Image (spheres, rainbow, N blue to C red):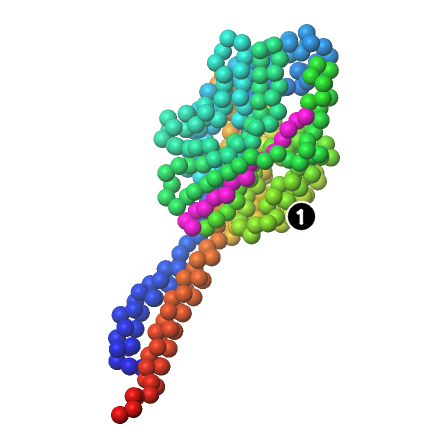
Amino acid sequence: MSRITRQVLILLLPFLLSLSGTAVRAGPIELTVMTQNLYVGADSDPLLKAPDQATAVAAATAAFQQVLANNFPARAAAIAGEIQAAGGPLLIGLQEAALISGPGTPPLDYAQILLKQLKTLGLTYTIVGSHTGTTVGLAGFSETDRDIVLARTGIPGFTATGQGHDFRPEHQVPVPTSVFGTVIDTRGYVLVDATLDGVPFQFVSAHLDPFHTPLQPLQAGDILAALSGSTEPQLVVGDFNADDSEQTYREMIDAGFVDVAAAVGADGATCCQAPNLSNPASELSKRYDYMFERGFSSIDSAFLIGTTHFEEVPPLWPSDHAGLVATVDIPEPSSAATLAASMLLLLSIVGFGIRSQHRIPPAA
């Protein structure tokens, strides 16, 4: 090895070692996410099952009064407090992020109300994807179902963009009613492509068929089909309206997803409190809300939120569903790549030195 090559190596070696050493010693990239069914605030069954127009109008009036009594702005403040206590998850999947209007009152936009409450706590989020479902309206009352994904803003190294998708037309559930005819319960999901510290991953939030029909596992299959072309780590969260004995749950597990909460012993019941949210003791008895992960390196933690009273007068509960927060570790493919690049650079320099020693001197 020539003297010049040796001097270059002496100068570069600390830099090369620092590159490889830092990459090898680098810790996992932690990602905290959340799912929460916000609860529209009233039971829609009496409206959908009304036998005639007059009964339906009375049911719509009663439902709207129940929505107002369930005071979503107050509930949103409690949910925002839970989000703050959880450290401000980077992505939040929201179900039943409704748009509601009624005679004589300003419209209620649940997503915007929650965003405002978060901002008062110093947490800034933006909507990165939404899915708009069915609208039911009667006698001046209207409710539109939406699924929303919120993303933290101002976080270095974090980006997210999303889009809503309908389930396939043949997988939408028809709901026969006497007043409205057959209502198609249009459901779907929000698919978000995100990057954290240079590592891409996918996040899906969904709200599946609540009637437990044979179409429900097919809706899960639509989500799996949408994710099948990617090798990135993936999270699927939401209100699946299925317990772990049902085929919908099995579809996710058979596709290689891990039930995050069950993996760390946080698989408590998430549904459902009384429709008026006034039950003193919790009535959560079913586990319908999940996070499924595929491709992450580990699961650090998971816990339920919204399982205690947030105030002592109705509404007592933030939602009729508990929420779920979890932290997973994103694999770091850059470690091996950085080390390999460092070694290739070192070898190329050494190779240059070796070649220079054996160069044939020019003819005299």
Asked if residue 177 lies left or right of residue 142, the reply is right
| Quadrant of image for the N terminus | bottom left
Asked if residue 314 lies left or right of residue 7, the reply is right
Residue positioned 73% across, 15% down in the render: 178
User: Measured from the top left, where is residue 179 in percent x and y?
Assistant: 70, 14
Would you say residue 194 sits in the magenta stretch?
yes
Asked if residue 257 lies left or right of residue 19, the reply is right
Residue positioned 66% across, 36% down in the render: 168
Would you say residue 90 sits in the magenta stretch?
no
Per the rendered image, the range of residues in magenta is: 184-198
- Above or below, comparing residue 352 to residue 303 in the picture: below
User: Measured from the top left, where is residue 238 in percent x and y?
Assistant: 57, 35
Q: Residue furthest bottom?
A: 364
| Quadrant of image for the C terminus | bottom left
Q: Residue furthest front?
A: 364
Location of mark 1 (residue): 254
Closer to us: 339 or 242: 339
User: Measured from the top left, where is residue 197 in percent x and y?
Assistant: 41, 49
